[in-house]
Amino acid sequence: MATTTRRRTVELPEHPDFLWTARVTPKKVYDVIIIGGGGHGLSTAYYLAKNHGITNIAVLEKGWLAGGNMARNTTVIRSNYLWDESAGIYEHSLKLWENLEEEVGYEMFFSQRGVMSLAHSVSDLRAKARNYHANKINDIDSEWLTPEQVKEIAPIVNINPDVRYPVLGATYQPRGGIAKHDWVAWGYAKAAADMGVDIIQGCEVTGFDIREGKVHGVKTNLGPIAAQKVGMVAAGHSSVLANLAGFDIPIQSRPLQALVSELLEQVHNTVIMSGMVHVYVSQAHKGELVMGAGTDAFNSYAQRGGFHVIEHQLAAAIELFPIFERAHLLRTWGGIVDISPDASPIIGRTPVDNLFINTGWGTGGFKATPASGWTMAHTIATGEPHELNAAFNLERFVTGHLIDEHGAAGVAH
Amino acid sequence: MSNVTFKFDGVDYVGQAGDSLATALLRNGVLHFTDSTYRDRPRGIMSLWVDEPNALVNVDSGAGEPMVPATTVEITEGLVARSLAGIGDLPDTRDISRYDRAYRHADVLVVGAGLAGLTEAKKYADKGKTVIIMDDQPEVGGHAKQCGEVIPPELLASLTLENVTHLQRTTVIGTYDQGYAVAVERRTDHVSSKVSTDVARIRTWHVRAKHTVLATGAFQRPLVFANNDRPGIMLSHAAATYVERGVSKFKTAVVVTVDNQGYTDAIRLHKSGVRVLAIVDIRKKLSKASIKLARKPAEKLGIRILKGATALDTNGNLDGILSSVVVTDPKSGLNETISTDLLAISGGWTPTVHLATYIGIKPTWSNKRAAFIVRSKVKSISAVGMLAGDFVELEPAVYFGTELDETQALVAFVDHQRDATLRDLRRAVGAGMVSIEHVKRYTAIGTAHDQGKTSGTLTMGLIGNLVGLALDEIGSLTFRPPYIAVPFAALAGRERGLHTEPIRTTSIHPWHIAAGAPMEDVGQWKRPWFFPKPGEDLHAAVLRECRAARNGVAVMDASTLGKIDIQGKDAGEFLDQIYTNMFSTLKVGMSRYGLMCGVDGMVFDDGVTTRLGENHWLMTTTTGGAAKVMDWLEEWLQTEWPHLEVFCTSVTEQIATVAIVGPKSRDLLAMLSPGLDVSKEGFAFMENKYADVAGIPARIARISFSGELAYEINVSAWYGLELWNKVMELGAPLDVTPYGTESLHVLRAEKGFVIVGQETDGTQTPDDLGMDWIVSKKKDFIGKRSFSRSDTSRPDRHQLVGLLPDTSAFVIPEGSYFAEEQHKGATPPIPHIGYVTSSYFSGELNRSFAMALVHNGRARIGDRVAIGNETAVITEPIFVDKENVRRDG
Amino acid sequence: MLNIPCPYCGPRDETEFHYGACANIFYPEPASATDEEWSKFVFIRENPKGWHAERWVHSAGCRRWFNVWRNTITHEFGPTYKPFTEQPKRPA
């Protein structure tokens, strides 16, 4: 039989023998309850323990740990948002990312391979230029690329001027990149559990114990659990929880789909987003292409969307990257994203005392996992927002002080 | 049977027409197919169809495909394929194959043309329903046909009825809400190894069916024991089928089984001349029916039956290919090594539940069938055949594998593609993973190319054993579309190149192209950016165009602006709500500029609206905002103010607009429309007149976006090009100069006119833009209430001002942020106080200038700001003709 | 791809429609609305998990608005009702 050279893939790291205790019975009382065992909930618990020495915490997850949006994620990490407030929190997050694997002691395949955002029209260039200058004056790493420079960094991009919407330029954040979502969650979870945090899976909050405008605990399918402070960090169910606690939030829950290909030879070495051609793509260490675009158009808790959304982004992808023509669509999935009116998060106090909320990250929450937890932990521990999340309050929808990131959110990742 | 020559891993082989690549290679004795992805273990073909985990190939001939199971590739003359170790190639060459889509409605979609599917199809077809029946195999008949059964001719006959659409080689890859299904049909790969450019290689079917019948059958699953992954170990149904097709490599076989299927397949092997050395059946006791159906026939053929035993381990030759199997029964002490060429495993049937799960139907665990089956409670979906559990007579044991020690567990494979073993499962459970989804992510089981088609139920069963949960407590895995991998290009279909989005052009477009104007994409529209004369760059062209507009006459195609015809007795009152200023008081025949805000008080569009009659208006919007504004108007009329009698019609494409601009535009108009009173007194600013222009009926509006004397000539779009040609012809002595969007931008900026989307980003109020003058104090309008919110009424918001750089040739890059003067030359981070929205070089002023939004801007006229190493002074946002006299000419 | 039951045209593909969020939005009298009431109108929309009375407009068809009950978990549609008509009971 003839021998043949076959492409090989990267070794996957082995996970620790022990991560956390599978079945934990909740205690009757905790200092803090975090509702939601996703990336942000787990990082909140971690930073409460690490930064504030609060370890008598229960993280309540109604399903399996980090089984929501964290389990089905396209993992783009960057901090080059438009407004100072956004740049502040996302840049803090990026700085935390840069040290996270070491600090938490967990391999996350964090890779700063750069994030590029393509411009395809004169007005697109103009908007990106503003974003670029905003980043520069805030000392956030940002480069302005000509189409030729785009091609130098990412040879597989089609910069032919004769396509429907040719590449006219791009912004580029070299420090941006990707990380392996499940392992980020597990890293935080293990570190938090090691510090004494109880992670309770299969525990769904069904109500709140609120007396005289102050929260005293939650009701769950495993019984009531009392706590001094409660944080709601449950993307996809923020409105459900808020309504249970008796107040409204300006959130709509939408399906967000994404997809992967089979394992392929490494051809794509950075992350590229295009708002106008409406797709963004990266290639993971193992070799699969990871791709996504925008949400489906309607409210949903079904964790699935329509196939036409997938078809359009595949068509967009092969216009930008003709080499992907033969790649196979292997798997699609959907999550529930909580979108806010200004595409900016809501982290802070609620009308109920000692009840705090963290929501509204929409389609771009993964990159904020560290700073979201950091600032939420601060807010819970001190009762006051951190300077980095002070602007992301519920009040802004009454005062009008919105932080509109629809543009910078682009194809929103 | 005709011969087909093909190449695999560089070696030429001959197979039979109709063979899959797997069959053909087995025919040629190829057992060692490839080596595993992570542990380099020799692997061979295990299965028959898309569930094949090991034999993945990269097809190099034809269109080329990076990763396909060899069991699904039909050999053709000249096929070239290579074995893979888990990673596919992405060649740099274009795939020029043709791909397309088809859309169908049907009463019934039947997925699967095995016996169950065919029966259902006939049932509905006979009732006169429109039926589409799709099957992914090359031939009708599914499982039964593979076993050599004859398909009843009346079932086949119904496939040719007029109301039946029958497609083979068509895989339904996804099911979606309200009866939507997507399927992928392979049309040419089995015909020829050449690229197909005239016939679609793959067609994607979109079907909306009132009722969907799922008859997707089932796959066999393997068992877990030590060294269960050697070449020569196959699923029993596959093994028997390959042998029946004429694969003669195997002289001896041992069958290990948990159900009656193993006996069926053992007998098939025997009948094809393979010496079946033993049937190893984990089930000690059998029902009377099974003894009669399965055991007795096998015993009659002299096949040895080991009851209550199972496979523990296997041995291989020097190449790692199967040489013997170790059979044990811990209870009886049996421990026997049997030499054999083939080890055929029947681990139970796993119904193909995917399509049901995609739309939320949860499969239920059946102990009697040792399987997750589909029982649909949804009226519009039915499940039949093996999918619905139609195999209870096989009496499977709920059994997934032997008790193994640490060393054995290390080579007991659960997911061949991930080289994931029982040891990995044990570690996962020990680590705290409770959910099958956790285990998947911890071990990577089920995440490879086959997406767990063979490993799924096996994994769940093993976890159940490890954590002490029954399978109905664990629940089924989450499956996701697509059911099989599909090339990106196939799904993109014809949505390629210039067809990815419509191109909108005005009726004057051919002239712009002929003139060599570079075009700018404004949404889906193409607009001329500038009109360079030979040797001119953008800068030079814009200087010339603007000079013409300010000193002579220039002409622009303004047809892309949104136009909405608004009629009704309440139109004026309605416009008063939509715009920030008054429109109901506008005189018939006059135009007025208006600003629109959202309910949040932020400007989102603007335009000039003309009162054509008592109850008749024509609104213009920005080019990009037309559809949004149209929707906005209708939303308010239909959902908030239905009592208003107002009718809106989009007329953007029905009217062409040519603007003639400059001090000599009056002269040009006089030439175009002799007899029209074009005098300053006779044709006032913002007035409209009807007249023939170049012999074409037109409405002329004296509107100016440049600050110069100007007229916008509106004609039926059919005559747009004719009008333009006439303007160019008659304007030649006046050196009439066409100008594009770049000059348009410069001219209006010199006057300080905002462009929505450039000076605004959705966070500016009219007051921010210095346009308090356009905000009526007399009436309410949409968004007004938001102005009095605390942040919206802050006096020091970012306000629109002008900037004049101290270096007069320095054109500040648009989008630049700037700081207090003292920060000149400082290193970031620097606290900023604003950003530049528009910035140009003005030929008129012979210097650069800019518009900017500055914190507390209006109170800071005269202050300086620093942009990097440069500085600029804050001015009023108007630069040319501050008294606005030029617009009268 | 949802199949949306336009009460004017019959069931049509989702891509022919624009979504309008929840139905029954109360537009307060702007002059007398408090900041909170105004904020509620501008920004708060229901977001239930389950049956949701929502608005759609058939942009590529009759271009008319209508309301419909839809389940946000199963995507099943319930009864439609035209603007300014009585809302049918929430489906079971």
Image: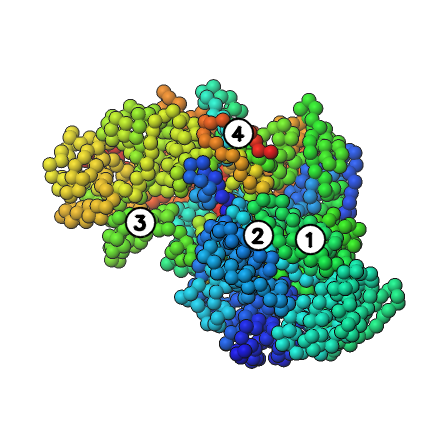
The reply to whether the C-beta atoms of the residues labelled 2 and 1 are less than 8 Å apart is no
User: Would you say A240 lies left or right of A399 here?
Assistant: right
Q: Residue at x 43, y 56 (%)?
A: B495
Instruction: Say whether residue B746 is visible.
Output: no
* Residue picked out by circle 4: C88
What is the secondary structure assignment of the residue under circle 4? loop
Residue B372's mark?
A: 1
* Residue picked out by circle 3: B505
Looking at the rendered structure, the kind of residue marked 1 is Phe
* Spatial separation of the CA atoms under disc 1 and disc 3: 56 Å
Q: Mark 3 or 4, which is nearer the eye?
A: 4
What is the secondary structure assignment of the residue under circle 2? strand
Looking at the rendered structure, the kind of residue marked 3 is Thr
* Residue picked out by circle 2: B213
* Spatial separation of the CA atoms under disc 3 and disc 2: 46 Å
Dot 1 crowding, Cα within 10 Å, few <14, some 14–19, many 20+: many
Looking at the rendered structure, the kind of residue marked 2 is Val
The reply to whether the C-beta atoms of the residues labelled 4 and 1 are less than 8 Å apart is no
The reply to whether the C-beta atoms of the residues labelled 4 and 2 are less than 8 Å apart is no
